[in-house]
Amino acid sequence: MSKIILPWFRVHIILLNDPGRLISVHIMHSALVAGWSGVMGLYELILLDTSDAVYNPMWRQGCYVLPFISRLGVVSSIYNWNIGIISSTAIQWTYELVIIAHLVLSGLLIGAAFWHWCYWDLDVFLSSRSGKLVIDLNRVFGIHLALASMLCTGFGLCHLTGYFGPGFWTSDSVGLLGSIRYIKPTYSIIGLTPYCYGVISSHHISAGVFGLIVSLWHISTRPGPSIYSLLVMGSLEGVLSSSIIAVYFAGIISSSLMWFGSLTTGLELYGPTRYQWDNGYFTLNIEARVNSMDRLLTLASWEQIPDKLIFYDYLGNNPAKGGLFRSGGQIKGDGIVQCWLGHASFELGSLEVSVRRMPAFFETFPVVLIDKGGTVRADIPFRRAESLYSLEQTQVSLQFSGGILSGSEYQTASLVKSYARKAQFGQMLAFDRKTSAADGVFRTSLRGWFTFGHACLAFLFWFGHLWHGGRSLFKAIWTGVTTSSELLAGVEYGRNEKLGEGTTKSSAFI
């Protein structure tokens, strides 16, 4: 008796030769995505603390799904709390309704996947002429593109603009005025105007219309024999290879937009980016606000700075500061913020100095006080015996403006050193470390996890594209079929009987 050796990708080969079960696994994949999002959203909603949206937002609590739900227009709960202004004309979706809708959809898709797995031998896949298993992959591509284009156009024309949808989360450049608003398309319908929310709706409308035109062309026309053979259009694995590279492109783009920041990833929902800390984005904005006010009223000027803007200017909110693979939200690292202590102004006699802030990827950093020209004027030395700039020797004083310590002055070296260490992290905040069980180890935010996960998946798709593309283009080599084109055609999708349903001349080459 001969021994049958099945390769590790045997289950994939079953799917290549079984259109009914291929549909089944596609439906099951959609069910898993919808189910995961529903269950994850429910988990986050149960644990979410909504008592303080300024100092304890959802992105610091480790929420992953809720920010994406909020971005698309759902900002309220049936328990009478919300994170933004709700339009009176919008459909009143709540977090709970969205979660229930995803769970119900997941259940229906699972049932449909089971049905298609059991009833795989459908007449729709049989040719009326020959009675053989045939699928027009070119027309299938056109149908998929048409459906995706209609969805894209509808999202831009209806959901974003508010005609039949709630709109989109928008905000200002420093993330203070975020809420759900309608996005009117720009005058350039193509959507190429930079730094404008209108390009989001314009891009979806134009891309959807263009895709719909292309899809109709693919449905109604046939490729020539040369391009059909060159692009291996008769092979489902060739179609899979082309599809994977599109997903790779989407993964890389979404990862980049999340990490570097964009109009679609608002600060209130996803937190600051690393580059805003590196470039002193919030610090410069705060100083510009203070300088625009009366310099004689320094204390009053700092008290008028919004708490949310102060909160952004803190190193612990930097997604690059906390390492990956540390479980929990950012509040598990440094705790829940209670209040702002105030802006610390260090003075060496009549000279104003400031603490050099810690870069993003440093775990420890020397405490150095510099003047406006960048010259070191004081520090906390590692070896005080050899120091000339220690705070005890230079007699640096400290004064607070704004916050709960507004107007307080300190000259004691131990207190000044303590606040100088805190000043390395940006604005000084008081934390509740006991309630949140903080361990002092920084975590990354939603931006870090999203970028890491989608970048890894994108590169897996890239390698999958190369693998399946190579198998499709060089099929004659790995199958060993080189005698005639008729035999080679036997390994193409739609030419074989279902694997395991008897032996045929063509199926022997799989």
Image (spheres, rainbow, N blue to C red):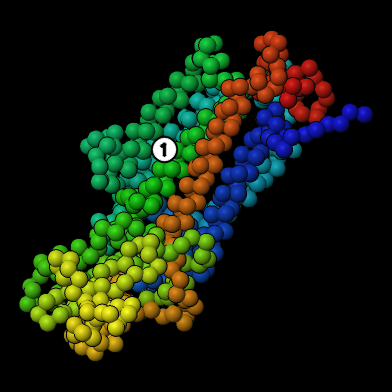
Seen at 45% across and 75% down, the residue is 440
- Left or right, 31 with respect to 301, comes to right
Counting from the top left corner in percent of width and height, residue 446 is at: 44, 59
Residue 363 can be seen in this image: yes
- Left or right, 4 with respect to 220, comes to right
Q: Out of 249 and 268, give the one closest to the viewer.
A: 249
Instruction: Specify the quadrant that holds the C terminus.
Output: top right
Q: Out of 359 and 314, give the one closest to the viewer.
A: 359
Seen at 57% across and 36% down, the residue is 464
Q: Image height check: is 104 above or below 237?
A: below
* Residue 396, picture quadrant: bottom left
Seen at 29% across and 33% down, the residue is 190
Counting from the top left corner in percent of width and height, residue 120 is at: 72, 33
Residue 427 can be seen in this image: no
* Residue 310, picture quadrant: bottom left
- Left or right, 365 with respect to 113, comes to left
Q: Image height check: is 374 above or below 239?
A: below
Seen at 26% across and 79% down, the residue is 387
Q: Mark 1 points at which residue?
A: 152
